[in-house]
């Protein structure tokens, strides 16, 4: 019954769409929707969708993502594009509104016929568009950190998962600042899931959780939490506070008389851009775990930082982990498309084919500013080296620890009972395979 | 949650710290609400752009500080003047045509708030800005087991100063008598020769200026962003509505809400504290819709 109804709805939607669109001359697009034309044609521009918020509460990180994406595309196009064709970005503003995210996703896939989507910063927006992406069997490049616990066949993530993110940070902090730790986070899914992971690392490191508090998203009043921290006397604070709240948190930390030397904040998100916004004196001394820092000393990063800041996209004056993850996602796409083209040719190329051929793709150290990374061939997240940086008085980060080798992404590390994520779906312990799990 | 665990973590010294913090939170709520109290209480204008006036205050301070190099303590009064001027222009150009239609002021000022937000974004960009303050304001004071940050004391002092100044203006000056007369009955006041139009204009500008003053201080506690006003406007409206639109009402309502938030947050957590607080406000308004100290005059 369910399938019948869905079939019926699909047909109705198609017929309805055709009726509405035909008089306006969109017939060609409808043909494409039926698959009459291939997604990418030799010698013609390759369209991709760039879906970030340029206005609203999420514009702070997402505008940078859009800019760096354009920079990466220019760079690829200047070097000859992909098989001789330039990439043509279709840039849309999602306005920090989840309904706009999902509407624009449909528009990009069905009307603009983009072959891949790059977008989203928060898990909430990703969860808003994934149903559409999966229903169209399309492809999303999600270029930032997230909590995991998803296993879809339509996404590639170039940021760290929760299991990679705090793995080194917690033992490092416990060793340096003592066993007692206080968790503070914004009140939504990513901080809570990240903290579940952090608790496991804390237990292994022999640490002790002396308090756990969540602040409403966007709240700027940290007085009560800081009073509780003062009572609990932890050795360090582990923070998953994000956005504007994060800046208020660091400012009030200092204003309330906390000393960074004796009780620093170890964060998963407070990077170069946040530090600049709060003022260097409020950021100095705190720690951040990320796969990339602007100060990384290697030729690729020097070239990336210099080239980006000099380009017309570098107006905001900094590079940070989120931007670097976005930058490499463009190259993951390039390599994936080239590999898929070589395997199936232009006519059979679909977004799904790009994803299926992206497993194991490597971005070498002469391209990725953070150093060699590769895409896992089972769960399509990224093998990367998490690094720990300490913010200096000038707002830059000094890298104090770097993982010896790339850490495996594992979206279900804290939910072994759910199963293992493979290329075909989530394999439960009893052997059943579930596709498209979000 | 059992009552035992609810009060299990009780400890006198930290509870007193929470009470002191409550005073500080209350001063922030009240400072955000003072300008709105005057505008709503006097002219009956539901000013949805109040949060953006606060945001403009923060950006004024930022501009003066980073482009003209003005020291912070001069930026604060300067922000008052700048945003008061913006309020004046807005009142003359738009609001004064809407006094007879109070519900339309809601829509019009909401539109203004969007214009201001996007305008600031066009000029300054959407990345956060930074307000520097003298070193002394970045620390805290410790008296025995009592802890409070210096800047919170500054905010408290400014709030008390602003509230006292407003009280003096309304109850000790000729202008104040005129304002109260217009509040009670505009037509009657006009027939006694009071220029009600001018009173509305000046009170609107004063209210906007107070929001600007608040903004220049909030920019230090928080973050300077085009969207920063949104988080304050809700608090401000709650204080004004609970207080009944009078100055005394706002002082009591701001004090009670801030203190309750701190106490609830002490016993549970921040998210739950807000939940309880907002539920209490809704229940209170159900029982007493006119607020704590409603003006005795006929409402417009």
Image: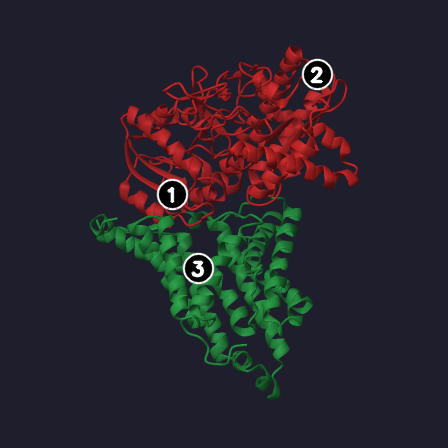
Tag in front: 3 or 2: 2
Question: Is residue B114 visible from the viewing direction of this image?
Answer: yes
Foreground residue, A277 or B65?
A: A277
Label 3 vs label 2: CA separation? 62 Å
Q: Secondary structure at mark 2?
A: loop
Q: Chain of mark 1?
A: A
Distance from the alpha carbon under mark 3 to that under mark 1? 21 Å
Q: Which residue is the site of mark 1?
A: A214
In the rendered image of the structure, the colour used to display chain B is green
- Labels 3 and 2 in the same subunit: no
State the residue lying farthest toward the top.
A343
Could you tell me which residue is drawn at 27 percent across and 44 percent down? Answer: A231
Q: Position of residue A28 (x, y in %)?
A: 77, 31
Task: State the residue in front, A190 or B177.
Answer: A190
Do marks 3 and 1 both belong to one polypeptide chain?
A: no
10 Å crowding of disc 3: few (<14), some (14-19), many (20+) = many
Q: Residue at x 20, y 50 (%)?
A: B4
**How far across and how far down the image is residue B144, in percent?**
26, 51
Which residue does the image show at 67% across and 17% down from the upper left?
Answer: A348
Say if B15 sits above or below B198 in the image. above
**Label 2 belongs to which residue?**
A346
Q: Which mark is residue B29?
A: 3
Q: Which callout, 1 or 2, points at the residue further toward the start of the chain?
A: 1
């Amino acid at each position: 019954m369910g399938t019948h109804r869905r079939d019926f709805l699909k047909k109705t939607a198609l017929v309805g769409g055709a009726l509405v669109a035909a008089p306006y001359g969109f017939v060609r697009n409808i043909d494409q929707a039926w698959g009459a034309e291939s997604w990418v044609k030799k010698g013609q521009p390759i369209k991709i969708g760039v879906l970030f918020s340029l206005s609203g509460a999420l514009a702070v990180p997402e505008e940078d993502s859009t800019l760096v994406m354009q920079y990466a595309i220019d760079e690829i196009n200047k070097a000859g594009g992909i098989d001789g064709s330039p990439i043509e970005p279709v840039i849309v503003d999602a306005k920090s509104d989840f309904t706009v995210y999902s509407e624009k996703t449909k528009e990009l896939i069905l009307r603009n016929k983009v072959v891949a989507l790059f977008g989203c910063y928060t898990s909430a927006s990703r969860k808003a568009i994934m149903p559409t992406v999966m229903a169209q069997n399309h492809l999303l490049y999600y270029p930032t950190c997230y909590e995991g616990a998803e296993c879809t066949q339509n996404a590639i993530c170039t940021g760290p998962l929760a299991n990679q993110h705090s793995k080194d940070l917690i033992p490092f902090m416990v060793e340096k600042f003592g066993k007692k730790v206080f968790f503070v986070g914004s009140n939504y899914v990513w901080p809570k899931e990240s903290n579940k992971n952090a608790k496991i690392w804390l237990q292994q490191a022999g640490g002790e959780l002396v308090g756990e508090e969540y602040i409403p998203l966007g709240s700027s009043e940290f007085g009560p939490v800081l009073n509780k921290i003062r009572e609990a006397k932890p050795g360090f604070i582990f923070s998953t506070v994000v956005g504007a709240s994060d800046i208020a948190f660091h400012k009030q930390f200092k204003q309330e008389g906390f000393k960074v030397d004796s009780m620093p904040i170890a964060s998963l998100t407070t990077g170069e851009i946040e530090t600049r916004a709060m003022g260097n004196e409020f950021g100095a001394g705190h720690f951040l775990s990320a796969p990339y820092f602007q100060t990384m000393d290697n030729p690729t990063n020097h070239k990336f930082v210099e080239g980006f800041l000099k380009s017309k996209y570098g107006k905001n004056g900094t590079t940070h982990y989120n931007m670097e993850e976005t930058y490499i996602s463009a190259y993951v796409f390039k390599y994936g498309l080239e590999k898929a083209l070589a395997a199936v040719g232009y006519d059979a190329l679909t977004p799904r084919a790009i994803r299926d051929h992206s497993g194991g793709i490597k971005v070498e150290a002469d391209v990725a500013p953070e150093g060699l990374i590769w895409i896992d061939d089972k769960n399509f997240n990224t093998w990367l080296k998490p690094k720990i940086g300490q913010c200096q008085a000038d707002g830059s980060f000094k890298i104090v620890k770097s993982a010896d080798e790339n850490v495996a992404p594992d979206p279900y590390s804290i939910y072994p009972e759910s199963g293992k994520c493979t290329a075909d779906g989530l394999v439960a312990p009893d052997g059943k395979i579930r596709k498209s799990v979000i | 949650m059992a009552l035992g665990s609810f009060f299990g973590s009780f400890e006198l010294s930290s509870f007193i710290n929470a009470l002191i913090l409550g005073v500080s939170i209350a001063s922030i709520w009240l400072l955000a609400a003072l300008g709105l109290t005057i505008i709503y209480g006097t002219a009956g204008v539901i000013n949805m752009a109040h949060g953006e006036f606060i945001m403009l205050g923060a950006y004024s301070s930022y501009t003066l500080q980073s482009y003209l190099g003005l020291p912070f303590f001069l930026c604060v009064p300067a922000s008052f003047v700048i945003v008061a001027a913006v309020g004046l222009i807005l009142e003359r150009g738009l609001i004064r045509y809407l006094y007879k239609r109070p519900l339309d002021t809601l829509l019009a000022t909401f539109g203004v708030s969007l214009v201001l937000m996007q305008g600031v974004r066009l000029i300054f960009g959407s990345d956060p800005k930074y307000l520097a303050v003298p070193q002394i304001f970045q620390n805290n004071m410790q008296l025995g087991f009592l802890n409070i940050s210096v800047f919170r004391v500054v905010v408290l002092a400014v709030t008390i100063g602003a509230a006292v100044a407003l009280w003096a203006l309304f109850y000790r000056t000729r202008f104040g008598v005129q304002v109260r007369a217009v509040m009670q009955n505009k037509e009657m006041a006009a027939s006694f020769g009071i220029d009600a139009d001018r009173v509305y204009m000046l009170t609107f500008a004063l209210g906007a200026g107070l929001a600007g003053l608040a903004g220049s201080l909030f920019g230090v506690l928080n973050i300077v962003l085009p969207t920063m006003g949104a988080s304050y406007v809700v608090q401000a409206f709650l204080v004004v509505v609970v207080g009944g639109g009078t100055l005394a009402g706002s002082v009591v309502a701001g004090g009670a809400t801030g203190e309750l938030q701190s106490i609830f947050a002490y016993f549970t957590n921040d998210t739950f504290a807000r939940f309880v607080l907002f539920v209490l406000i809704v229940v209170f308004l159900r029982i007493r819709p006119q607020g704590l100290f409603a003006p005795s005059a006929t409402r417009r």
